[in-house]
Amino acid sequence: MNNLKVEVIEEATLKNFNTYKINAKAKYLVKVKDIDSLREVLKYCQKMGLQYFILGAGSNVILDEYFKGMVIKIEIDNFEIKDKIVTCGAGMMMGKLAKRTIDDNLTGLEWAINIPGTVGGSIVGNAGAYNSEMFDNLVKVKVLDKNLEIKTLKKEEIQYGYRHTNLKDAQVIVLEGTFKLEAGNKEESLALVKDRCERRMASQPLDMPSAGSVFRNPQNDHAGRLIEEAGLKGRQIGGAKVSEKHANFIVNTGTATSNDIKNLIRLIQDKIKEKYNIDLILEQEIVDWKN
Ligand SMILES: Cc1cc2nc3c(=O)[nH]c(=O)nc-3n(C[C@H](O)[C@H](O)[C@H](O)COP(=O)(O)OP(=O)(O)OC[C@H]3O[C@@H](n4cnc5c(N)ncnc54)[C@H](O)[C@@H]3O)c2cc1C
């Protein structure tokens, strides 16, 4: 590790790097703030035959207990606005991106104010809320490909759908996204943001660690409604509990392990299948580090 210019933390705890606050650990953790550092770390991993995992804000993942490789946390946060075109580093938090565009009297990203993820993670998963999503305003994405070459992918070159893109399978690392917004009105945008914040505060268990909605909504229905109706609100396995406030959230009551969360997910899926013959599809990502 000595010959790397970036600081590498050994035997790192990842508790503060995932919103479930799972006490996972990694042999190595590195935070990268620019493309050169990222390349250097990736070359090092290749040379040493070390597995790596790209992490944003860890707000959509259920992390496994221990990873023998290198967790690379993306903190690249360049930012530029030019004629309603916004270019933003993958490590910037979505709330910050939304706020900066609103401050510039641009409209289109208000929905993103409460997404506790990075721009990179949100592009990869096509995050969205209130009938809006990342790909509505996205124009192009700058990525680092498997050969460590920088490529620009136009929106049309990426396959995307509801909370999904093919970027993960393509094994590219998102470096930045470019968005085209519309001229807006700051006061109107702030009023919209206030409404969204109040709605979330009222309906989601934001005072407890979670990773947002656990399951996608089945067609013409709500996963939360089905789970509540099946009597699963408050059901607990170890430290993982189905939220009393919103049944499509699993919260960590303090000691939840990834197994607690995964077992509770399975229990919910089994019960919903048995009762309604519906297969609930996971919106969160189970990270299974094959050490
Ligand atoms: C309270 C709460 C509310 C939420 N509400 C919403 C919501 O309304 N809508 C919604 O869509 N989501 C929501 N989420 C889920 C989550 O915030 C989003 O999915 C977010 O986009 C994930 O971004 P991240 O940076 O945390 O990604 P991570 O969880 O860090 O990573 C997710 C995946 O993306 C990959 N990845 C991350 N960064 C990169 C990169 N730069 N290049 C390549 N791959 C990368 C990771 O390897 C991983 O596979 C919520 C979560 C919480 C905790």
Image (spheres, rainbow, N blue to C red):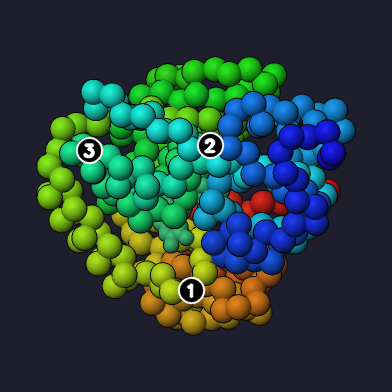
Tell me which amino acid carries mark 1: Met
Determine which residue is flagged by label 2: 76
Label 3 or label 1, whichever comes before in sequence order: 3
Q: Residue at coordinates 54% horizontally, 61% vertically from top-left? A: 19
- In the picture, the disc for residue 250 is none
Above or below — where is 106 with respect to 242?
A: above
Q: Residues within 10 Å of mark 3 (few under 14, many from 20)?
A: some
User: What's the distance in space between the residues labelled 1 and 2, CA to CA?
Assistant: 28 Å
Quadrant in the picture for residue 202: bottom left
Above or below — where is 62 with respect to 87?
A: below
Determine which residue is flagged by label 3: 104
Q: Residues within 10 Å of mark 1 (few under 14, many from 20)?
A: some
Q: Of 270 and 182, which appears nearest the observer?
A: 182
Q: Give the SS element for disc 3.
A: loop
Q: Residue at coordinates 48% horizontally, 37% vertically from top-left? A: 77
Q: Residue at coordinates 46% horizontally, 68% vertically from top-left? A: 249
Which percent across, then down, holds residue 124?
A: 50, 37
Determine which residue is flagged by label 1: 208
Quadrant in the picture for residue 34: top right
Q: Give the SS element for disc 1.
A: loop
Which percent across, then down, holds residue 165?
A: 49, 34
Any atom of ligand 1 within 8 Å of the CB at mark 2? yes
Which percent across, then down, holds residue 232?
A: 48, 78
Q: Of 217 and 7, which appears nearest the observer?
A: 7
